[in-house]
Image: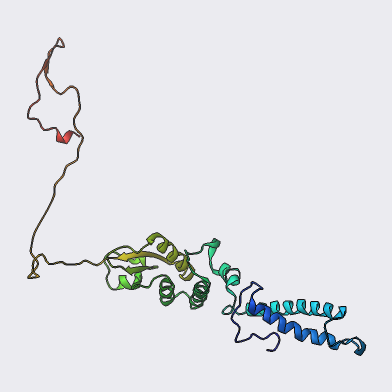
Amino acid sequence: MARFTVDPNRVNFSIQRKGKEYNLRVLQRSQAIFSTLLGLLPSNYRSTINGPNYTQELRAVAVELAKIELALEDINLDLDYQKTRSEFLFSIIGYLIFLNNRLPGLDYDDQEFRTFFLNLIRIYFQGSTPKSMGDAVGLFLDTEFQILENFILVRNGSANLDISDQFGFQVGVVTDNQFPSEVFDLQSSLRIVLDIVRPAHVLFSIRFIFTDEFIPSDETGKIIDSMRWEMASYYYEDYRSYWAGLKDVDRLGKKTCKSVIGEDHSMDF
């Protein structure tokens, strides 16, 4: 392969400079450099064997130069974000879009991590559109969901929205009548990516949609009318120590007690 050109058959693009493939590349590159260095020497210093000390020193220099050249070739890979190595994706791309190092909960391997970042950059460059926001939500959901813009719902006569809700949208996640696993982590991740894509003046809400299910109560499948209700009352017990009441009070202050029977004091509290 030509120098400073990526080998299409190369497999390992890690920053760890070790391994069988890397050592083979160093060997091939250092051999070419070693031959070039030998060609710079006068004829009386050229040897066909590796015995002389100067050949050993030139070979060591060739190995180090080969490592430097391979490192420079790898740096060229990082100039294009689509080819940037996974170890540098966050330092080169992530800090541009994630605020305050807020990363969503990711349990990804190297390839999944790389795919997530590249998809997020692609979505980011699409602009703040409903499609972009839907694509961002789709990074974390493999179930059905909806992106509903409030101003369209108001235009169609939605009862619970008005003109004050025009700058907003709703994310409706269709469920199988139960919340997704790790629902709080999911909501946090969705809010992080939506904060990246959405316009700054737009607010949003995340809803989980449950579907009612009808189960017939008999074999005919008919709906049987029925009604059930419950009534309950919660109040404090009257623990007043004196409940007998006063019949009358004469001029001399004599009091006559009389039991209170049948009086309604419910409005007194």
Tell me the quadrant of the picture where the N terminus can be found: bottom right
| Residue 184 percent location from the top left of the image | 40, 59
Whether residue 68 is situated above or below residue 230 in the rendered picture: below
Q: Quadrant of residue 182?
A: bottom left
Q: Is residue 246 visible?
A: yes
Whether residue 243 is situated above or below residue 166 in the rendered picture: above
> How is the protein colored in the picture?
rainbow
Determine whether, in the image, residue 57 is placed left or right of residue 5.
right
Relative to the observer, which residue lies in front, 167 or 242? 242
Determine whether, in the image, residue 21 is placed left or right of residue 110.
right
Whether residue 193 is situated above or below residue 33 in the rendered picture: above
Residue that extends furthest to the top in the rendered view of this protein: 252
| Residue 61 percent location from the top left of the image | 80, 77
Determine whether, in the image, residue 143 is placed left or right of residue 45.
left
Q: Quadrant of residue 4?
A: bottom right
Relative to the observer, which residue lies in front, 106 or 57? 57
| Residue 121 percent location from the top left of the image | 52, 75
Whether residue 91 is situated above or below residue 57 in the rendered picture: above
Tell me the quadrant of the picture where the C terminus can be found: top left
Q: Quadrant of residue 20?
A: bottom right
Determine whether, in the image, residue 234 is placed left or right of residue 60.
left
Number of marks:
0
